[in-house]
Amino acid sequence: MDIKICYDSEGDYLEVIFERKAGYFRETENDAVMEKVDEEGNTIGFSILKVISNFVQISSKYRCSPTESAQRIRLISS
């Protein structure tokens, strides 16, 4: 699996795509999060608006260091 991760610091926008194929973004219960789905409704990615401000609100027990995050991304993309 080839995961594509893009972050726009100017717009504070994160996009993560699991599969590169046709699809569209649809709303979720969270106003900042959109889910990308294919024609069959399978999740193929997601996007998050205002990533930094939303991250700050997350409880510290769920946060990980940048090193831990990089390791998790490597594990997921392997």
Image (cartoon, rainbow, N blue to C red):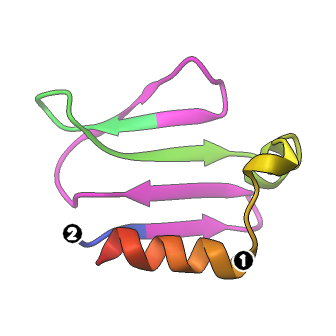
**Residue 73, percent from left and from top:** 47, 72
- Crowding near pointer 1: few (<14 within 10 Å), some, many (20+)? few
User: For residue 46, what is the image quadrant?
Assistant: top left
Quarter of the image with the C terminus is bottom left
Q: Which amino acid type is marked by label 1?
A: Pro
Residue kind at label 2, given as amino acid type = Met
- Label 1, label 2: how many angstroms apart (C-alpha)? 22 Å
Part of the protein shown in magenta: 5-34
Q: Residue furthest front?
A: 61
Numbered tag placed on residue 1 in the rendering:
2
Residue 64 position, x and y percent, is 73, 64
Determine the secondary structure under disc 1.
helix
Identify the residue at horizontal 18%, vertical 48% (top origin): 22
Name which quarter of the figure residue 75 lies in. bottom left
**Where residue 60 sits in the image (x, y, percent)?**
86, 50
Residue highlighted by disc 1: 66
Q: Residue at x 66, y 33 (%)?
A: 32
Residue 18 part of the magenta segment: yes
Q: Position of residue 20 (x, y in %)?
A: 22, 61
Q: Is residue 68 magenta?
A: no
Q: Residue at x 43, y 79 (%)?
A: 74
Name the residue located 13 percent from the left edge and 32 percent from the top edge.
39
Residue 48 in the figure: left or right of residue 56:
left
**Image position of 54 with respect to 19: above or below:** above
Most distant residue in the top direction: 29
Determine crowd level at label 2: few under 14, some 14-19, many 20+ residues with C-alpha closer than 10 A: few
